Amino acid sequence: MDFIIPLLILAIPLGMFLLLGLAGMKMSHKLAGVLGTLGMGTVLVLSYFTAFTYFFSGNPEFISEAGVRLQSVIFNQEWLAFTPNLVISLGFLLDPISAMMLIVIPTISFMVHLYSLGYMHGEKGFQRYYAFLSLFSFSMLGLVVATNIFQMYIFWELVGASSYLLIGFFYTLPSAVSASKKAFIVTRFADLGFLIGILILSYYTQTFDFITLTSDPGAAFASTAGATFMGGSVLTWAMVLIFTGGMGKSAMMPLHIWLPDAMEGPTPVSALIHAATMVVAGVYLVARMFPVYLAVPFSLDFVLVVGAITALYAAIVACTQIDIKRVLAFSTISQIAFMMVSLGAARPEFHECLGYMASMFHLFTHAMFKALLFLGAGALIHAVHSNNYTQMGGLHKYMPITNITFLIGCLAIAGIPPFAGFWSKDEILVAVYSYSTFWGVWMTLVAGLTAFYMFRVYFLVFWWNEPEYHHRPHDSEWTMSVPLIILACVSVVAGLIPFGKFVTWQGHEYIIHMNWVVAGISIVVAVIGIIIAGVLYLRENDRPKCMADSCRWLWTAAHHRFYWDEIYLFITHKIIFNGICRPIAWFDRRIIDGTMDGFAIVTNKASYAIRNLQSGRVQNYVLVYLIGALLLAVITAWCLA
Amino acid sequence: MESVGSIIMYLIIALSIIVFSVLTVTTRKILRSATFLLFVLFATAALYFKLDYEFLGAVQIAVYAGGIVVLFVFSILLTSRPGHSSEQLVSRRRVIGILAGLATLVVAGGALWSRCSMALAQLPAMSNPDMKLIGETMMGTGDGQMLLPFEAISVLLLACIIGGVVVARKR
Amino acid sequence: MDITLIYYLVPAIIMFCCGVYGFITRRNMIAMLISLELMLNAVDINFVVFNRYLYPEATEGMFFTLFAIAIAAAETAIAIAIIINVFRAVKNVDARDIDKMKN
């Protein structure tokens, strides 16, 4: 395949970022928005073309005689050649998962660009917003097509930076500023682990290249044999540390605290970055390195356990949140945890790593319906000017399009056939059950909770009791409705895609067999969740209140997200600040600064003391000169004598 | 053995140099100070004559006595107001001055003392340097001849003329 | 009695010391300049006397004195130009009043 089109996929968003970032302030809002959207539209077409070429052209570059999909490096440009062993390249890797991401990212990104034309209309810094969106699209595309782990790391950080910029977009709001700082700092800690992991890995394998690493992990890691650190093999440490980076980006426990706060950003940004694309980077990372993870079963178990705990935690918290975007945020955390669990449960002996395929499938469908839900939430917020559903209710009368699309999104995430979420979630549950019944039951429970909390939101917003509206809410203009409708259609049909033909472990075609036992259980659980939600929230009543009162402590704890933020605050403020930072600050101020200040004070005092020598009086100067001259004469004479 | 006239001549010169030097720096009227300077310069010129440097003595009188002192007198008349020509010396400052002068004296005297043999050299015979020799030395470029310093002085004087005009012109 | 070299040097030294004293004590800038002339003159005498007594065949001492006189004249002219200029600015020729480079 020619390298022009893949290169353009990366170059257009970057160019658009530079154009809008540098010249945007000279443009009108409309021009900047249309330019950004058109640029993204071009990328959409090009990346669809690339992905379709990859999947359907039958080119031997992409698919072998036996029908195995291959990893294909379109180009790989040497970029930083530090030493013969340490060479960092930038390239474009096409394989099933990157081709899939080439569909997901531009689709969502384009929808968000289009949607933002209406949603962000008239906001201050509109051009800046589009510049940042382009930067984000560039970074995310660069991340998924990375040919080596270092390129991935570079774009990983770029994605984090653009996320930071977009969360803090309303930089006059203190909450937005602190949210962006929080996101940046938390992911920074995670990325530290990622970097250390990369360094360990590349130190032992002498390569960054994904294909070299993943095609034969056994050979690549031969040199790590016997190297252990604190009871774990070096490779285990490296993989767990790399996964730490993924935990930060994908908001796994205990590094999840930034994601709910990240909802301070504009809602389309939440849809794009904090629901559909960036936060799944962690899943993508694990999938990308999956053969290596397979070589270290412990690290996969770690992924599984972290994912499972996070999924349950986030689902419980989502049931008690009041802010509609926070509910969606916790739902996102929970769904990403599903993907993680699925990856963690994937083993070659269970349906040829069904979990890998299921995870990618869920990533794909989740991106679509979660973006739909966020954009729908954006439309709601736009209509009633509040994030809290206490200010909403009965909206089905006023906003039919939003109502139907949001309902489709909810059904999709709840896992009701034939909507997208059902198919992918079902695959995940099959994979998890085949690995361990315990975790299977656990995840089924979470799936039921998912259905419950999503329909809780749905009923509270669109039914329940109608509050006093200052002005009549109505459906949004076409730039906002069209993306909703498109994404709703995709959410309906995406599950019917024979995903096993495209994205599977090692590229073999995998025929999805429905396991109707598992599917039946999950449907039943989901329906039960929906029915409970309906009973509690369809009409206004005091049953929810009674329920909350019946176990007040649990409700309060969940409402406060089980006090994770408080724990973090306690650890940072009370322990780290007092125990470490204060002594360091004291040392810095008293000893280091003190030394420097001491120099300054001594100099100052000395100059005051000798200031009178520079009086400007000629005669004083002469006197001093004379003394000097006489002394010199005496000394000379004395030395000569 | 010097002639008596020579000795008397020397005594007059030496005494007037010492006395008038002291008076120059101790008198409180600035115009008198300039006048005593003139006498010192005359005595110096006499000293040059006595040492057989007639041309030098003539230059001393012409340039110093004729030029510089006149310049001094003019500038004094330009800058000092009548009746305000005297200045009160602070005693502390005077003590410092005396100490500085004495220190100089001690160091220079010590230097002289340490070269006793040289200091007691007799006056050798010397032919009076005539004008031809002086002119050739000034204009020659040979060994021990002084065209380069002469030209340097010329440039210096030119610079002084220009500088003087620039500094003193009315703004 | 022979008039040896030292007989000429002693008045020169005294003249020089008077110059030093005057330069340090006098407040009037013209008086300071006069003291300066005294010192210069003392040095001139030194040159001449050493030339005459120790190297009677050479002429360098004499020529140095000659040049020194020329330079002294130039220096005096410039100094007086500056003093008059300062006088125009501060209406004074007291050295204590001109301890600033720029007013």
Image: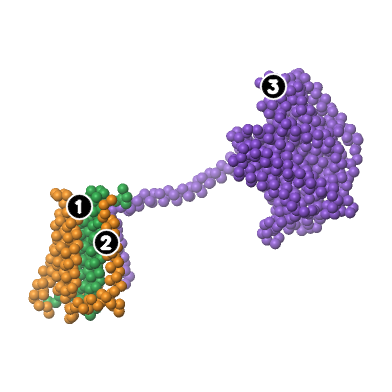
Chain colours: A purple, B orange, C green
Q: Which of the two marks, 1 or 3, is nearer to us in this view?
A: 3
Asked which secondary structure carries label 2, the reply is helix
Tag 2 residue = B161
Q: x, y (%) of residue C64?
A: 25, 71
Query: Which chain does the numbered disc 2 sit on?
Result: B
The residue sitting at 30% across, 77% down in the picture is B141
Residue B2: x and y in percent read 12, 78
Q: Secondary structure at mark 3?
A: loop
In the picture provided, is A70 more to the left or to the right than A561? right
**Residue at image location 61% in from the left, 40% down from the top:** A27
Q: CA distance from mark 2 to mark 1?
A: 21 Å
Query: From the viewer's perspective, is A10 left or right of B33?
Result: right
User: Disc 1 sits on a residue from what chain?
Assistant: B
Q: What percent of the width, then of the height, locates residue A619?
A: 26, 56
Return the residue at label 3.
Answer: A472
Q: Nearer the viewer, residue C35 or B95?
A: C35
Residue B79 has which mark?
A: 1
| A603 displayed left or right of A547 | left
Mark positioned earlier in the residue sequence (2 or 1): 1
Give the CA distance from mark 1 to mark 3.
95 Å
Instruction: Judge the density around disc 2: few (<14), some (14-19), many (≥20) Cα neighbours within 10 Å.
Output: some
User: Can you give x and y, in whole percent of width and height, for residue A96 in the image?
Assistant: 81, 47
Q: Amino acid at mark 3?
A: Arg
Q: Tell whether label 3 touches label 1 (CB within 8 Å).
A: no
| Picture residue at 18% right of the left edge, 68% below the top | B60
| Among the 4 quarters of the image, the one containing residue A433 | top right
In this view, A414 is above or below B61? above
Is residue B138 in view?
Answer: yes
Q: Classify 10 Å Cα crowding around label 3: few (below 14), some (14-19), many (20 and above).
A: few
